[in-house]
Amino acid sequence: MENYIKILAVAIVLVFAGCKDWLDVTPAGQATESDLFSTGDGYRSVLNGLYKSMGKPELYGRNWSYGMLDCMAQLYNLESGSFNDEMCKAAAKYEYTNTQVSSSIESAWGIAYNIIANANDLLQNIENASNDIFAEGEMERKMITGEAYACRALIHFELLRLFAPAPVNDDGRAYIPYIESYPVLSATKLGVKPVLEKVIADLEKARGLVAVYDTTINGQGINLSGTGRFNNDFTYNYQTISGQQIEDFDAALIDDFFKGRGYRMSYNAVTSLLARVCQYAGREQEAFNYADEVVKAHVVFRDGSKNLMYKDDYSGLTQGWGNNEADFNNRKDYKTMSNLIFAAYNSLSYQGTGSWLSADWKGGVSPNWFQISESYFLHGGVDEKSLDHRWNHMIFLGSGAYPVSAKYFIPTNLDTRDKTVNLFPVIRLTEMKYIMAEYYARNGNVGDAYRILNEIRENRGIYGSSLGGSTWNEFEQELLHDARREWISEGQLFFLYKRLNAAIVNDKGTLRPMTLQESMFPVPADIK
């Protein structure tokens, strides 16, 4: 590249206190790089800073989740005369030269490469660091190293999916640089395939490193449930299974830095990301194997019984039936945390957001509500809203009439609010099942492909209407149909359309193919 990529590492220090405070970073004067990397806490600080940046509104904290990307996937009805977010309306029309849209794109690019720069700075310093400066010695050093590689890979992959064509439309041109050192003032852009190869190499390296902690008793205990992964709720530690406690796991003795693995690139998160990337790269067998491993991930108790780490548990959502404010205020889990493998975090997500996330807007439709079309819950002419948990427990009727995603419902209970609204899903168990089902369908095993889709639907309350078919095209449409419900307000639907080169269904049920130019952001002008 002829011009410069402006990326700066930021020195940060953590303050550890409560449930999720390991994610909070506070500037501490002008700490030098040598000071920062002289202690294990300094490495913890930089690593946690990577995750904190991912939760910014320009990335997973809005635009890469319920905001810009879902607008581009035509998930919402933005034509309402009351909707006034011009950036989202322009993004939904793929108007990337719109001033607000281009500004958002450039901001995301800069933050993303800042994360990569900080990851590279960490990796270069930790390579020669002594195990002795880390509280848990070599194990901690390897875990931090692995997570940094995984973060670097994740952000590069997201940039590739945003700024380059999908492999199905790869034209062999170079699109983005893959930065592997710090500092870097210029770099050569690479094509889709070389970037994917580097992403996979980084993730494979990361997987082996984070396994050193995540496959231990403590690592498994921390990951065993959604409430444990995201809320540090380890009540199961005190439950008995056939008279036996969960091995020797005792959460009270574990350093807070090793908790909250759902917000970190844990072994299963890295494995899941490998499944996603390999599928994107057309490495179908590898994608299936990685996804299958995550789906089957479990802990074995002393009595031989097993507990799956990831499952479809809607018990936190099904306290009562109804889509109004009072109904949702009684619920505890708006994101189905049991199904979540990795999520970003933003402690300020519900502050100063106007009515994007507000459930108590009064006086008609909010000017910032992303309204979901009821047509997405029609299947074969049958209205499945009354059956599907994804409508009757995950769609909030604003002002009693306007359907918006309850994944970002703001409850009055402050404890519930802190444990739910701040969480932004990035990888779900459902995606691993989609990957396996697609593998079966592409290889002629439509029976197992539909078995998986039917199990997903049944786990969400839809019984007595088994799906079936004999061709890839039939299966693809069913996959897209279910994903439109599963990934509401999570930013993944756009990438599914793009990878499959599938026509997008808008809120009125109209099919519309994306052009190549619409499917990718333009690289910011100052670094072309």
Image: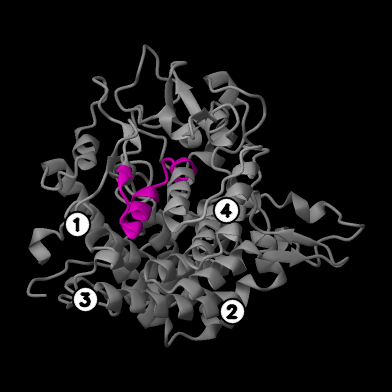
The residue mark sitting in front, 2 or 1, is 1
Residue 263 seen:
yes
Q: How many numbered discs, if any?
A: 4
36 horizontally vs 58: left or right = right
**1 and 4 marks in contact (CB < 8 Å):** no
Residue 219: x %, y % from top left: 65, 67
Residue 439: x %, y % from top left: 50, 65
Q: Residue at x 71, y 63 (%)?
A: 253
Question: Which residue ends up furthest to the front in the rendered image?
Answer: 470
Question: Where does label 3 land, which residue?
Answer: 190
Measure how far apart labels 4 and 2 are at the Cα level.
42 Å
Which quadrant of the view contains residue 81? top left
Measure how far apart labels 1 and 3 are at the Cα level.
18 Å
Question: Where does label 1 land, which residue?
Answer: 516
Q: Secondary structure at mark 4?
A: helix
Q: Residue at x 77, y 56 (%)?
A: 237
Question: Where does label 2 land, which residue?
Answer: 139
Question: Where does label 4 land, which residue?
Answer: 450
280 horizontally vs 333: left or right = left
Kind of residue at badge 4? Tyr
Residue 499 in the magenta stretch? The answer is yes
Which quadrant of the view contains residue 280? bottom left
| N-term mark: 3 or 4 | 3
Measure how far apart labels 1 and 4 are at the Cα level.
30 Å
